[in-house]
């Protein structure tokens, strides 16, 4: 298939997925399903594009495996939260802002289908890579993928374990990776997209893979990730989260700042 035909195929699948997600949201009044549907769409896109791409077997096989495992893990993780908990505060605020308009939610879900297509462009670049076998760039891409997916998995599990303790209700998580970044899960999610940049090296569409880390950084930093997450945290945890903001780097992990007496501001109590 040509890249345009591949993108159209992904678009059809994404629209069907998001339509189903919208119907589920309408019945259960929980728009958090959109994130699980987005991740599922990315997993399917990785497999479909690997199967239909014109590139060599090795980059296509790696795309199918790495892309589907990354997105599948994320989809399952989000689905467990959506299934077992109440609607995320970000979507409750959106529901209130839209007065529960299902028409606006339908457009929102369709916009997420468009985002699946856009974020699958790096996959198209990998699937078109004609370089056969394992190259140094391939091995480096695998290393980046392993580190980033492992880091994101650890961050998610640390936060889930913290939330599971009733004693931490109303506090901010400062344990494990969350001591060094307010959003370690977002950091590793962004880092993960460099895997496809490296796997696409050697192909004519390699430049397309750069859209992954660039677009993901913009979305996480300024549009749909950090701004909404931090606004919700400030609404629910107030001064405790403001202290966390003052002491802990926003995205890129680093050591927390210290109080004038030399002790770290961050503590190990709380709920994110």
Image: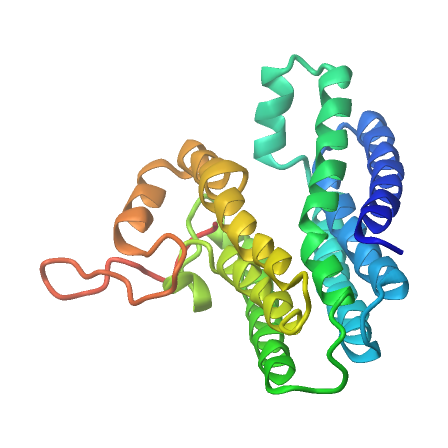
Viewer-closest of 9 and 208: 208
Residue positioned 32% across, 66% down in the render: 254
Viewer-closest of 225 and 241: 225
Relative to residue 169, is residue 174 drawn left or right? left
Residue positioned 67% across, 58% down in the render: 122
Q: Where is 1 relative to 86, above or below? A: below
Viewer-closest of 31 and 46: 46
User: Residue 178, image x and y in percent?
Assistant: 43, 61
Relative to residue 270, is residue 64 drawn left or right? right
Q: Where is 129 relative to 25, above or below? A: below
Residue positioned 75% across, 31% down in the render: 109
Quadrant in the picture for residue 96? top right
Quadrant in the picture for residue 149? bottom right
Furthest residue in direction left, as rendered:
260
Q: Where is 111 relative to 35, above or below? A: above
Location of the N terminus by quadrant is: bottom right
Relative to residue 218, is residue 51 drawn left or right? right
User: Residue 35, image x and y in percent?
Assistant: 70, 44
Q: Is residue 164 visible?
A: no
Q: Where is 101 relative to 205, above or below? A: above
Viewer-closest of 202 and 44: 202
Residue positioned 76% across, 27% down in the render: 29
User: Residue 223, image x and y in percent?
Assistant: 50, 37
Q: Is residue 259 visible?
A: yes
Question: What coloring was used for the rendering?
Answer: rainbow
Badge count: 0
User: Residue 220, image x and y in percent?
Assistant: 51, 46
């Amino acid at each position: 298939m040509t890249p345009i035909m591949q993108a159209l195929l992904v678009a059809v699948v994404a629209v069907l997925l998001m339509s189903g997600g919208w119907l589920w949201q309408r019945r259960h009044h929980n728009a958090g399903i959109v994130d699980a549907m987005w991740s599922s769409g990315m997993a399917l896109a990785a497999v479909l594009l690997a199967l239909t791409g014109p590139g060599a077997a090795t980059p296509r096989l790696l795309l199918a495996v790495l892309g589907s495992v990354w997105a599948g893990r994320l989809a399952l993780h989000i689905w467990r939260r959506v299934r077992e908990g109440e609607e995320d505060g970000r979507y409750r605020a959106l529901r209130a802002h839209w007065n529960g308009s299902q028409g606006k939610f339908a457009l929102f879900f369709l916009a997420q289908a468009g985002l699946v297509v856009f974020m699958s462009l790096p996959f198209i670049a990998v699937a078109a890579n004609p370089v056969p076998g394992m190259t140094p760039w391939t091995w480096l891409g695998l290393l980046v993928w392993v580190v980033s997916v492992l880091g994101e998995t650890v961050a998610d599990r640390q936060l889930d374990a913290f939330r599971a303790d009733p004693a931490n209700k109303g506090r901010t998580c400062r344990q494990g990776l969350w001591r060094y970044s307010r959003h370690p899960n977002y950091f590793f999610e962004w880092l993960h997209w460099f895997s496809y940049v490296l796997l696409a090296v050697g192909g004519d569409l390699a430049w397309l893979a750069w859209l992954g880390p660039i677009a993901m950084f913009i979305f996480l930093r300024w549009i749909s990730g950090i701004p909404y997450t931090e606004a919700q945290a400030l609404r629910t945890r107030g001064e405790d989260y403001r202290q966390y903001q003052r002491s802990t780097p926003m995205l890129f992990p680093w050591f927390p700042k210290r109080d004038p007496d030399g002790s770290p501001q961050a503590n190990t109590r709380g709920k994110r």
